Amino acid sequence: MLNLLKTHFGYDTFWSLQKEIIQNVLAQKDTLVLMPTGGGKSLCYQLPALKFPNLTIVVSPLIALMKDQVDSLRANGVGAAFINSSLAAAEIQQIQKRIENGEIKLLYLAPERLALSNFREWLKKLKLSLIAIDEAHCISEWGHDFRPDYRNLKRLRADFPNVPTIALTATATPKVQTDILTQLELRDAEIFVSSFNRSNLNYIVRPKQEAFGQLLDLLKKNRGESAIIYCFSRRDTEELAADLRKQGIEALPYHAGLPAETRRATQEKFIRDEVPVITATIAFGMGIDKPNIRLVVHFDLPKSIEGYYQETGRAGRDGLPAECVLFYSFGDKFKQDFFIRKIEDPREQSLAREKLDSVIDFCELASCRRKFLLEYFGEKSAAENCGSCDTCLTVSEKFDAAEIAQKILSCIVRTGERFGSAYVAAVLIGSRDAKIRERGHDRLSTFGIVSDFSAADLRQIIKQLVSKNLLVKAAGEYPTLSLTEHGKQFLARREKLELPKVKSAAKLQAARRTDILDFDAELFEKLRKLRKKLADEQNLPPFVIFGDRSLQEMAYCFPQSLASFGKISGVGARKLAALGEQFVNTIREYAAAKNLAERPLPMRAERHSKRANRVGSTYFQTKELLAQKLSIAEIARRRGMAESTIASHLEKLATEGESLNLEHLRPPTEEFTEIAAAFRETGEASLTPVFEKLKEKYSYEQLRMARLFLQEDL
Ligand code: ADP
Ligand code: ZN
């Protein structure tokens, strides 16, 4: 399987669960896969399809995506095709011929095709090895994306009762899950649920102040990279795009009100790296599968956590770091409220309100945002601090909150425990709100007694008092605050209280970016240009040629032969043959001008294996220098260490199972034969007996090296 993985897809290792899923599919069992976007679902049926003797059909709802998927497979040398309404009858016939001749391993189909009896008759005559149902949640009315055409899949099951089926989705609610199992009649299906944590995404919430300036900074930081900015209204998308263009940032709007042709062209430009920034309503995103989106901004509040997770999920599908930034202002809530009040069905209205409240909770969180998201979707996450959301990245200082808490609690008591946090905060800061005057609350002793906190700060502190169980918030449309027993005690006894400082004021540290290579940015740009040129020549999106991760590895390792180029992640046999030379030439030229030597990846081993983690980075520095074919003496000199230390590093790395590039250190044959014989005679691995046996003819360092090769050669 690993062989197939490298040959056809260019990857060296499976991601979490892929191997287990593929094994289950190869055993011809039914399978259900719940995995987030970017988790690597496609491979779970594509790899088995290569191994199976007959055809695999893949049902997928999005016609626009099929072509990219098939192009990607073909670029990897896999026989793949699609049949949907975008093709002419003659083209379809041609594809059918090729399928009958066994030239195609994977056939992508739109579900509506299965309603055509002619087509089904044709299909029935074929031998199938596997049926894969992508976006399987579309079959469920409980899902957010129900598609009646998916009902046709039942017929497919009826026509091919014995062909194993794999259903895949990034929607994991239990209701949808059972719906998929029953509607698709999966038999004793093995269910694989992976974590929905997108560890390469940073979640950041910023106060919506001078948001446009903040946005410009973000886009400048990510210049040239793909970004989506979600806005509240169609008009907002157009205005924001125009404003950005005035600032020299190429941006285009996208919303459902634009002509179909404009939308298609905009999407195409985005996918082909011709326009980096799209300002959009949520209508944008379903039809795209662009792996290298580096930034997703919510310029306004999302309607639900589900929507937020899905929209941010479009960032960083390729697993490289990406940022998700939400600009939050409590006032934006009222824009949404306006629409919620218009919902007629009372049940739906209260549901919409609950969803929006969760978004507000998320924005006003004083704890880890990632943890909140995962728990919202029912996943218990162990870590309290993820190190890559703004609350975790903010230096948390505490302050003496006893006085402000007293003020808040007594204001709530004085106003009769009948109001929510916005109102309580307004009374405390002495707002001129007419409602406050009407109710006579401007005559309370707690009116206007707070001057050292803003209303927004107060709401955050109230949140914290709720989480400290001093207050409770009622559920429903009117989330009024009241004191708990604990809160009453606190007020009566004037207890002490410390709280974390309000976050909006605190400074954000740089996000931890563990997974990123320190690649050569200039070469990366050159390779990106080459990728774009080749993509245009073949009329393909650039990511079909190579992903950003592959280009980054090239711009780190400087591979200058086809052999070393073939080791880059994403370079399979087909791409090596078709593209290797052009890329290697570009790299070689650059490396020669800059006097750069090839070097191996430093990170990959650390990223994926626990074993490597135990070996501290000092060993990896040695390993890197070793890979540049330096002698032990030279490595020792550069690192300012003793030769014996370097030799011990090599031994340590070797015993930890690291693959080392040692050939240039191999002792001369005669010397090696003599030392090897001595080791064999003493029958043990210690150096001293050999040292003595050979009458001190060789140094300890020489013996160590010979011992390494003895082990290697075994
Ligand atoms: P999903 O369908 O779950 O959103 P994809 O199947 O599109 O995810 O995979 C996301 C990206 O990750 C793709 O670019 C894919 O080629 C890449 N990928 C998948 N599996 C691996 C792997 N084992 N090693 C490296 N890259 C992988
Ligand atoms: Zn966090």
Image (cartoon, helix red, strand yellow):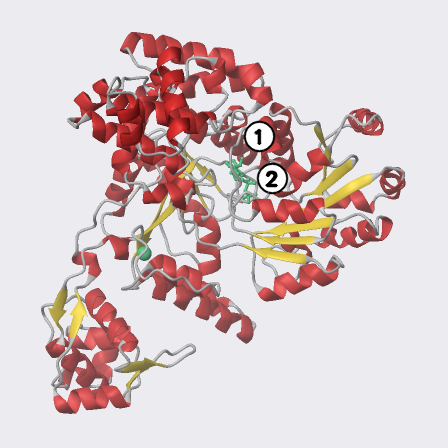
User: Any atom of ligand 1 within 8 Å of the CB at mark 2?
Assistant: yes
Per the model, the C-alpha gap separating discs 2 and 1 is 9 Å
| Marks 2 and 1 in Cβ contact (< 8 Å) | yes
Q: Is residue 658 above or below residue 332?
A: above
Where residue 442 sits in the image (x, y, percent)? Answer: 16, 82
Task: Write down the quadrant of residue 330 in the picture.
Answer: bottom left
Q: Is mark 1 within 8 Å of ligand 1?
A: yes
Residue 698 in the image, given as x and y percentages of width and height: 26, 19
Q: Amino acid at mark 2?
A: Leu
Quadrant of the image containing the N terminus: top right
Q: Nearer the viewer, residue 646 or 148?
A: 646
Q: Residue at x 25, y 72 (%)?
A: 464
Residue 539 appears in which quarter of the rendering? top right
**Residue 346 sits above or below residue 156 on the image:** below
Looking at this view, is 186 or 325 the one in front?
186
State the SS at label 1: helix
Q: In the figure, is residue 525 to the left or right of 540?
A: left
Give the residue displayed 78% in from the left and 51% down from the top. 152
State whether residue 72 appears in this view. no
Residue receiving disc 2: 43
Q: How many marks?
A: 2
Q: Amino acid at mark 1?
A: Phe
Q: Which mark is residue 9?
A: 1
Q: Residues within 10 Å of mark 1 (few under 14, many from 20)?
A: many
| Residue 301 higher or lower than 269, as above or below | below
The residue located at (25%, 38%) in the rendering is: 217
Determine crowd level at label 2: few under 14, some 14-19, many 20+ residues with C-alpha closer than 10 A: some
Q: Residue 453's x, y, as percent?
A: 14, 67
Q: Is residue 213 left or right of residue 311?
A: left
Q: Tag 2, which secondary structure?
A: helix
Question: Residue 153 or 698: which is nearer the viewer?
Answer: 698
